[in-house]
Image (cartoon, coloured by chain):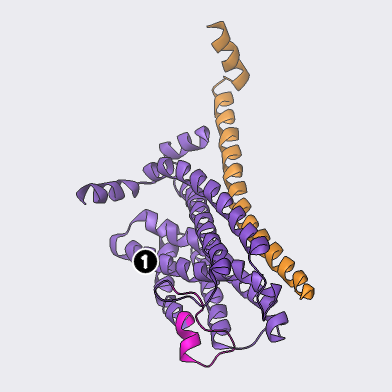
Amino acid sequence: MSGHWPYIIAAYVICFSMLAIDWFASSFELKKMRNAARMRQRREEKSRGLAFNDLAVKDKLE
Amino acid sequence: MNKLWIWLNQLGSPARFWAWSQPWLRRCLALACVTLAIGLYGGLVLAPADYLQGDSFRIIYIHVPCAWMSLFVFVFMAVQGAAALIWRIKLCEIFVIAAAPTGAVFTAVTLITGMLWGKPTWGTYWSWDARLTSELVLLFLYLGVIALYHSYSEHRAGARAAAVLALIGVVNVPIIHYSVSWWNTLHQGKTVSFTGQSKMHLSMLWPLLVLTIAIKLYWIAVLLLKSRVLMLKLERGKAWARDALAGI
């Protein structure tokens, strides 16, 4: 009966790997979109002449 | 009842769904992890070995919940597809597309774990049996829905075509379910019954039910996550989506 364990382990490893890949693929995509949005925001602020750091300094001075 | 309809109607708005789904996603994922740990301990450690199959029967603790989910997700897609086609609800279209990849994963896991159980039990990985073949057809239907959606450049047209395929393909679900009764199959008949007496002893049955709940909770969490990603992609230009991305 102990000869069954390689099949059991393979089944569990394949199952949870596939479910984890499915989860992390979406989670990674969300992270990528967030980073792209941040970069875009930074670019927009730079084009307006106010970089992130400038804004922070300005806040502190005020 | 009226309040429920108003709430459901409001939930159809992407911005409201975004705000509502975040806490539920976390709760479902946390509950899925807890129930998964309990179910796995019960199934791999506490449950006794089967007197005929030995330890190989422990594969059913992932095979059966995934098989049930593969059928459930396709029915869910068909229902959402019908709602999307009749009432043109954007959220329903998103649900059809977001549910398909995880449904395909459940079906693939069902087939692979079934093969790994079949080798020590039947002496073969595969047999062109009615249950196995109809489950393989289900995998092709899931892949078809995904491929059809991606073949369109416009989201709504792709989602509607995918919804039609989901509605046609749902006919395969009762075929899978009743295949073991309609044909003489190598696959065993119904073991677990929610209405009558189950053929499994309670000491073996409870981990299966706990893992079924765990897999269902995982699916709700992953569906919410995929819907949120898809929604952000589609509504990228809108103010709520920009605010949502900045606030994650």
Q: Residue at x 51, y 78 (%)?
A: B199
Whether the magenta-drawn stretch holds residue B23 is answered as no
Q: Residue at x 67, y 84 (%)?
A: B126
How far from the left and from the top, in percent, is residue B64?
A: 56, 71
Of A12 and B228, the residue lying toward us: A12
- Left or right of residue A2: residue B208: left
Q: Residue at x 55, y 65 (%)?
A: B208
The total number of labels drawn is 1
Vertical order, B30 against B117 (above or below): above
Q: Which chain is purple?
A: B
- At label 1, the amino acid type is Val
Quarter of the figure with residue B136: bottom right
Q: Which residue is mark 1?
A: B79
**Chain A's shade in the image?**
orange
Vertical order, B166 against A13 (above or below): below
Quarter of the figure with residue B75: bottom left
Residue stretch rendered in magenta on the structure: B176-193
| Main SS category, magenta section | loop
| Protein chain holding label 1 | B
How far from the left and from the top, in percent, is residue B209?
A: 51, 64
- Left or right of residue B211: residue B182: left
